[in-house]
Image (cartoon, rainbow, N blue to C red):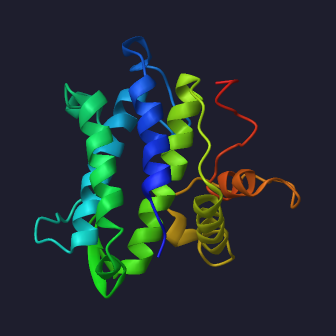
Amino acid sequence: MLDLAPTARAVADVVTGVRDDQLHDPTPCDGMTVAALLDHVHGLAWAFRVAAQKSPEATGTAPSADAAHLVADWRTAIPARLTALAQAWREPAAWEGFTAAGGLDLPADVAGVIALDELVLHGWDLAVATGRPFSPDDDAVAAVLEFTTAMSAPGQEASREGLFGPVVPVPADAPPFHRALGNSGRDPRRSPDAG
């Protein structure tokens, strides 16, 4: 069982620091502005909370990434949803059996790892786009590295489709977070400080 709370707090810190004049800026997510990515984080926090609770509220669609749908109170709504997401995954039952997220039925423990992966990677995306600091905890990085490494293995190309871009080569002795970013199709040389 993983604790999503430290990463959820780190992402919330990035979110609350986003300035209004940055909402139309590009992010490392292909074709996504900061506002669109915020909308996506808002939606995925809800979707994966519902997945943890195995609630009938689950929808058959992936969370949107549309700036036009970003809620007006996003600076408070997204952190609140991130807190609720982390709390839901603290329940041992969240990690058991099967659940649904983004229109997929999958083992609950896999859904929990994907939720963490989404938080870590999109937290970094937002940080890079807005020049905010972002440092996920070591346990989160280890879990995301394991997941992205498995998704980068030969034969996983179809599974990566829509989830990750092409692998960005990173030295084998690079820090674990850099290797996870590279596995996910992100260039770790783009730091939050460099933008």
Q: Is residue 83 left or right of residue 6?
A: left
Q: Is residue 114 left or right of residue 171?
A: left
Q: Nearer the viewer, residue 103 or 130?
A: 130
Count of numbered marks: 0
Q: Is residue 92 left or right of residue 76?
A: right
Residue 67 x, y percent position in the rendering:
29, 30
Which residue is the extreme one toward the left?
A: 56
Examine the rendered structure and indicate whether residue 89 appears above or below residue 189. below
Examine the rendered structure and indicate whether residue 161 appears above or below residue 72. below
Residue beneath the point at 49% across and 51% down: 7
**Residue 63 in sight:** no
Residue beneath the point at 47% across and 64% down: 3
Residue 96 x, y percent position in the rendering:
34, 85
Examine the rendered structure and indicate whether residue 88 appears above or below residue 33. below
Which residue is the extreme one toward the top?
A: 21
Residue 52 x, y percent position in the rendering:
28, 70
Residue 2 x, y percent position in the rendering:
49, 70
Q: Quadrant of residue 173?
A: bottom right
The quarter of the picture where the C terminus appears is top right
Residue beneath the point at 29% across and 36% down: 66
**Residue 28 in sight:** yes
Residue beneath the point at 69% across and 76% down: 154
